[in-house]
Amino acid sequence: MGFYPLQLPHLLFNPMLTRNMKVKELNKIMKPQINSNCIHCGACAFECPNEAIFKFNTPYKIAGTERFPLKKRTYYIVPALCSLCVETAGKLLCADICPMNAIV
């Protein structure tokens, strides 16, 4: 999963989608991810204001329901919990603090 520019025209100019539907779809494809450059330092998880970053093999909870870990070898970001730090900093705090630039 990642950002694919070819999805944007179909998404943005689709008359069948409401504004809220477009925002939800954009959030799905544009959320940050942690790649294989991760050295497991945990700086990103500590910095995240939404507690959306979890250590590998650690389950997470959404609305009180425990979910299985998304990754088994690196830290991972739960898209449903990530707000892109918009309300707190206006930028990705996790990407700023990552020493390996592993968050894309």
Image: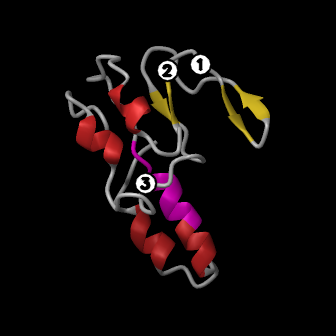
Residue 104 seen by the camera:
no
**Screen quadrant of the C terminus:** top left
Q: For the point 41% across and 31% down, which residue is it?
A: 46
- In terms of image quadrants, where is residue 87? bottom left
Give the CA distance from mark 3 to mark 1.
Answer: 21 Å
Amino acid bearing label 2 = Lys
Q: For the point 77% across and 43% down, which residue is it?
A: 63
Label 2 near label 3: C-beta < 8 Å?
no
Label 2 near label 1: C-beta < 8 Å?
yes
Q: For the point 42% across and 19% down, which residue is it?
A: 74
Residue reaching furthest to the bottom: 15
**Left or right: where does residue 1 sit relative to residue 99?**
right
Q: Earlier in the sequence, mark 3 or mark 1?
A: 1
- The residue where tag 3 is placed is 84
Give the magenta range: 24-32
Q: Position of residue 35 (x, y in %)?
A: 33, 29
Residue 21 seen by the camera:
yes
Q: Is residue 26 magenta?
A: yes
SS for dot 1:
loop
- The residue where tag 1 is placed is 58
